[in-house]
Image: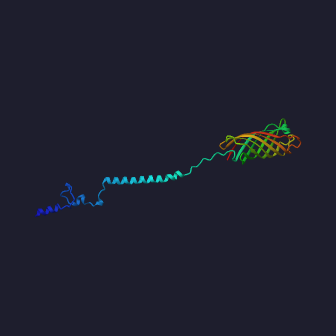
Amino acid sequence: MFGALMARTVSPPRPSGVAAHPRCAGFPTFLSGNNVPPENRETPRRTREGAFMNRRGGWGTGTLAAALLASPAVAETPRVKAQPAPGFGASGLTVRSGVTAWSGNVGRQTGVGAFLALLGEVPIVSGVGLELGYEASANGYAEPRRGTLWRHNGGLLAKVGPTLFSQWRPFIGAGAGLSYFHPTPMDVGTAFEKGWGAEVPLAAGLEYRYSGVTAGLRATYRVLVARDFAPDSADAGNLFSADLGLGMRF
């Protein structure tokens, strides 16, 4: 009877349907892994890897969907077009410099001089522009006298000419101007005095444009229609100039 009681204590009956591991025979069932609740049991490796792959697949699908939804917005973004370079029909500034020479009595008392001009041009209609600017020139006296006849001019010039091959522009022009003459020094015994003179410039030239930069050459003949800087000269003369110019269109 004592042996039967010990056998019942050491080997209690196992729950039905649960197989005991051979090595676990003779141990209480509470030490066996079969009594661990399902929620506390270790997840099998394949189950964890499958869940991870499912999550990766979900992320990849979401990324692809976002890219497909964003692609129409990218395609609809307007492209910024390059602005064409300004042509002869645009406003601009030009610096001109060259040589000057007088005819008549002024030409007999002076030599070849130089001038510098700053001009602004605005378009009026296609092929027609208007120049407005300032010009300063200096012509030295002929020997043996020593001095300079200075001229400060403000004027305007209407230019007419076609554009050829989108880069070349021959032109002719006419306008009006007012000049102030200042001979220096005043005690050299010349017939010139400080005074004013009105003139009509007649010009012809050729301009070349590359992108927004222009370069050109010009010849101008200025007819004096009124002058008081040479009161003793019946034939004061007119002014001829030839120059090169460099400008920018905007």
Q: Which of 158 and 224 is in front in this view?
A: 158
Q: Is the residue 186 above or below the residue 23 in the image?
A: above
User: Is the image coloured rainbow, by chain, by secondary structure, or in one colour?
Assistant: rainbow
Give percent across and percent down for residue 158. 76, 46
Q: In which quarter of the image is the N terminus?
A: bottom left
Q: Is residue 82 left or right of residue 24?
A: right
Residue drawn at 32 percent across, 52 percent down: 46
Which residue is farthest top?
Answer: 143
Q: Which of 116 and 185 is in front in this view?
A: 116
Q: Can residue 34 be seen in this view?
A: yes
Residue 223, picture quadrant:
top right
Q: Nearer the viewer, residue 83 or 232?
A: 83
Give percent across and percent down for residue 177. 80, 46
Residue 43, picture quadrant:
bottom left
Q: Is residue 64 left or right of residue 14?
A: right
Q: Is residue 183 visible?
A: no
Tag count: 0
Give percent across and percent down for residue 192. 86, 42
Q: In this view, does 36 lie to the left or right of 58?
A: left
Which residue is farthest left?
Answer: 1
Give percent across and percent down for residue 194. 84, 45
